[in-house]
Image (cartoon, rainbow, N blue to C red):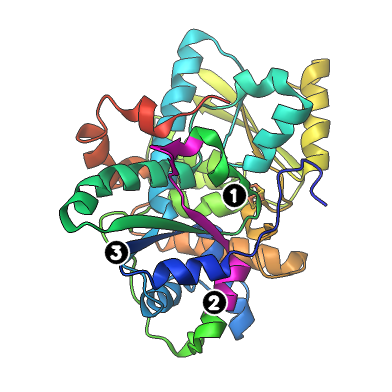
Amino acid sequence: ACPTGAITIRDEIGKAWRELYDPKKRVVFQIAPAVRVAVGEEFGLEPGVNALDKLVSALKMMGAAEVYDTNFGADLTVMEEAAEFLERLKKGGPFPMFTSCCPAWIKYLEKENPKYLKHVSTCKSPMEMFAAVLKDQYKAKDAEDGRTTYHIAIMPCTAKKMEAAREEFQHDGRPDVDLVLTTQEIITMIKESGIRFTELEGESPDLPFGMGTGAATIFGTTGGVAEAVARRVVEDKSRNTLQAIQFSGLRGSEAIREVSLPVGDRILRIAVVHGLVHVKKLLAEIEAGTAYYDLVEVMTCKTGCVGGAGQPYGLLPAKHQRAEGLYEADRTALIKRSERNPIVGELLAGPLKGRTHELLHVHY
Ligand code: SF4
């Protein structure tokens, strides 16, 4: 059972099929980073093989109107979270700033340790940032053709079902994410369709929201969010600096990792923690004053989202292979830093200008 009470297992496959077959609906998907490196396992692919292109093809065959990438939402998160962090550095806190992508972590704080809620970044999770932007941008399309955009997020995580249902993420009486399907649920749907997954020709996610960077891809494993934010806040953006961040200690499997990173005239203290038992230990150390950090990345699942409860069952080596698959995707990505995502840049300078607080931030 989930120790935070955040996880409710619901099988929503029937609901997804009904929406896909409803002619009045336009079903639009987003796919989280960790899903792509695990979805192939049930079809005989090795853990860590990036099957995003095959998953896009499968969803199109199943009736998806558009298939996008949560990486786009992760790039938005990096931009907003880095800006918030730099602002806190100017204002002097509150520190540490905790990351906000993991809904089980938020639920744990609300139930067990609410005094730290003010330390949590006000950024919505990538899934919710993506969904808020999508629903906003599709309003005109819905009015034009009379169909309703129905948004399904494929996530490695059962707690994301709880997050999608939170009242903070409802607009005009509807949730921004209409339905969350886990990796396991989408695997079942592919099997039900009789699709031969491994034989599919791959297809890229659709534009504009199918574009994401390498920094966004590594969100799916422990240390990825902190590394992506570090890439954004360091002033020297050279290849050497990216490599220095890569080897700084943010990556790895130790339960709690600590890194010092120079930014301007400051040395930032960053911690990465995964697994709830270790999160509690770290909080106790912060409370006792024996540890100080400026930024803490928290993921309640061991190994981060690659090891989420919605993923196919896998032992630790498989989860590490999935993480390696994400790092490989980052290595081969055309764009490695979120600020270089051209669609994110256009949106922030255009339709989202002056509306980022409304669409991309939340207070718990
Ligand atoms: Fe979900 Fe686990 Fe990832 Fe948290 S760490 S967002 S609970 S999969």
Residue drawn at point x = 31 percent, y = 67 percent: 65
Where is residue 243? Give x, y as percent. 49, 47
In the image, 305 versus 232, the foreground residue is 305
Which numbered circle lies on residue 189? 2
Figure check: 294 above or below 45 = above
Residue carrying label 3: 206
Q: Earlier in the sequence, mark 2 or mark 1?
A: 1
Locate the C terminus by quadrant: top right
User: Is 15 situated left or right of 110 in this image?
Assistant: left
Residue drawn at point x = 48 percent, y = 37 percent: 169
Q: Secondary structure at mark 2?
A: helix
Q: Earlier in the sequence, mark 2 or mark 3?
A: 2
Where is residue 181? Give x, y as percent. 55, 62
In the image, 57 versus 92, the foreground residue is 57
Residue 93 among those drawn in magenta: no
Residue drawn at point x = 56 percent, y = 44 percent: 165
Range drawn in magenta: 169-189
Residue 173 appearing in the image: yes
Residue carrying label 1: 160
- Would you say the residues marked 2 and 3 are in contact, meaning their CB atoms lie under 8 Å apart? no
Where is residue 269? Give x, y as percent. 63, 26
In space, the residues marked 2 and 1 are separated at their CA atoms by: 19 Å
Nearer to us of marks 3 and 1 is 1
